[in-house]
Image: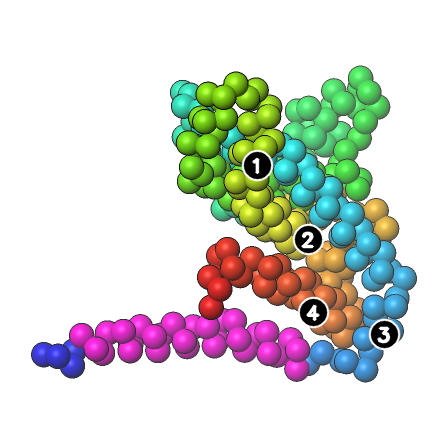
Amino acid sequence: MSRRPRLVPVALAGVGGLALLVLVAIPMVALVARAPWSAVLDVLGDGANRTALRLSLVVSLWAVLLSMALGFPIAWLLARVDFPGRSVVRALVTLPMVLPPVVGGVALLVAFGRRGLVGQWLDRWFDIQLAYTTAAAVLAATFVSLPFFVVTVEAALRGADRRFEDAARTLGARPGFVLRQVTLPAIRSALGAGAALSWARALGEFGATVTFAGSFAGRTQTMPLAISDALDSDVRAAILLSLVLLTVSVAVLAGLRNRWLGAA
């Protein structure tokens, strides 16, 4: 009778270890092992690849800035204000996390494309065309990365000790002062974590970008799109460019280790 309970965690550990080996470890090891290290300088020194990397950084950083600027008010409302339809708003915010990216791209296209629901008026009134531009790539990256910032910050706001905020208000502090000097410092680690997760998601965005912005070198072709194109012409370049994004992902994970995985 005493042996059977012990077999359960052993079996679970075995299944989990096998899954990690097959689905994570082996593909990552294969990517590193098959990398043409002798061609690193040639691939990374190629002008088109450098342009794709630069564009990815520009697009992802703009996406993070927009996610923070737009996401914090949303997170605040969801965490601190009890209003009708709050669950619906939360569902809409988190929808891009589960929505296939290509579906998000189609939605952006029919909304902001030249003949889209909003895009037709932008074109007619202001001569603004978003689709297949760098701005479209930024919008697509923001669409998929915003929920990561909102969810992280909302959880932090809900868990924050509000007694310090109440004490500051009791002492006559204005709402803006309480926000800047009490609330934001209390959740600064969550702000950093949310921004890092949002940036990593924006950096790796593919489906919504290729659908709404296309893949035009120097204008909308970010690193994930360049990797996809390289698979048809130069597998070595695709592997090395993939390793660049893998390195970034590992760096983000290492930076978030203390928050999400503990110090051990």
Residue 172 in the image: state x and y as whole percent.
52, 18
Instruction: State the CA–CA distance, disc 4 to disc 1.
Output: 35 Å
Q: Is residue 143 left or right of residue 57?
A: left
Question: Which of the two discs, 1 and 2, labels the residue nearer the N terminus?
Answer: 1
Task: Specify the label residue 184 is tagged with.
Answer: 1
Label 3 SS: helix
Residue where numbered disc 2 is placed: 203
Amino acid of disc 2 = Leu
Residue where numbered disc 3 is placed: 41
Categorize mark 3 by other alpha carbons within 10 Å: few (<14), some (14-19), many (20+).
few
For the point 62% across and 51% down, which residue is it?
196
For the point 57% across and 36% down, which residue is it?
184
Task: Specify the label residue 204 is tagged with.
Answer: none
Vertical order, 144 against 43 (above or below): above
Instruction: State the CA–CA distance, disc 4 to disc 2.
Output: 13 Å
Instruction: State the CA–CA distance, disc 1 to disc 2.
Output: 26 Å
Q: Quadrant of the N terminus?
A: bottom left
For the point 16% across and 78% down, which residue is it?
4
Instruction: State the CA–CA distance, disc 1 to disc 3.
Output: 43 Å
Amino acid of disc 1 = Leu
- Snapshot quadrant of residue 113: top right
Question: Which of the two discs, 2 and 3, labels the residue nearer the N terminus?
Answer: 3
- The answer to the question of whether label 1 and label 2 lie on touching residues, with beta carbons closer than 8 A, is no
Q: What span is in magenta?
A: 5-33
Task: Specify the label residue 243 is tagged with.
Answer: 4
Amino acid of disc 3 = Leu
Label 4 SS: helix
Magenta stretch: helix, strand or loop mostly: helix
Q: Is residue 158 left or right of residue 230?
A: left
Vertical order, 120 against 262 (above or below): above
Instruction: State the CA–CA distance, disc 3 to disc 4.
Output: 13 Å
Categorize mark 4 by other alpha carbons within 10 Å: few (<14), some (14-19), many (20+).
some
